[in-house]
Amino acid sequence: MKDEAPTLERMRWDTAILVCRACGKRSNGPKGMKPKALVSIIRRDAKAVQPRPRVLLTGCLGLCPKGAVAVAVVSTSLPPRLIAVRSVAQMEAAMPLLIGDATLR
């Protein structure tokens, strides 16, 4: 068993949205907005997208925006994107960027 080669598995999703958990813990992080709440908003708004993106809480993404949460999107069909979200309204407005309906300007 130890000598077997690893197998390549097929994923059920082609887009991963990563929400930085560390941003919510910083003293200069966003006020009144928690990363877990952002994950819930993203999952709710992405239900209609097929295939549905995978939304994950992750460690530090390295952007460390003052007063915001870093959100990264990695997709097989689009270039990687990294955005800073400062409010729930911004999160809802950024959904087209996250799911690929718009391009970053």
Image (spheres, rainbow, N blue to C red):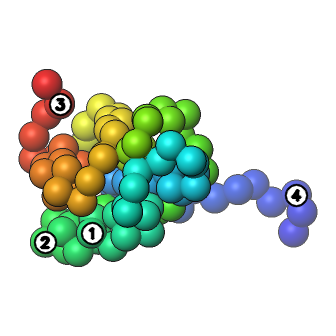
Q: Three-letter amino acid code at disc 3?
A: Leu
**N-term-proximal mark, 2 vs 3:** 2
Whether residue 41 sits left or right of residue 22 in the image: it is left
Could you classify mark 1 by the number of other residues whose Cα lies within 10 Å: few (under 14), some (14-19), or many (20 or more)? some
Distance of label 1 from label 2 (alpha carbons): 13 Å
Do callouts 1 and 4 mark residues in contact (Cβ within 8 Å)? no
Circle 1 is placed at which residue position?
41
Q: Nearer the viewer, residue 86 or 10?
A: 86
Secondary structure beneath label 4? loop
Q: Three-letter amino acid code at disc 4?
A: Asp
Do callouts 1 and 3 mark residues in contact (Cβ within 8 Å)? no
- The structure residue drawn at horizontal position 17% and vertical position 30%, both measured from the top left corner, is 104
Task: Locate residue 42: give its quadrant.
Answer: bottom left
Could you classify mark 2 by the number of other residues whose Cα lies within 10 Å: few (under 14), some (14-19), or many (20 or more)? few
Whether residue 99 sits left or right of residue 70 in the image: it is left
Q: Quadrant of the N terminus?
A: bottom right
Circle 4 is placed at which residue position?
3
Q: Any mark on residue 48, and which?
A: 2
**N-term-proximal mark, 3 vs 4:** 4
Q: Three-letter amino acid code at disc 2?
A: Ala
Secondary structure beneath label 2? loop
Q: Quadrant of the C terminus?
A: top left
Secondary structure beneath label 1? helix
Query: What x and y, as percent, mark residue 60?
Result: 58, 44
In front of the other: label 1 or label 2?
A: 1
Circle 3 is placed at which residue position?
104
In front of the other: label 2 or label 3?
A: 3
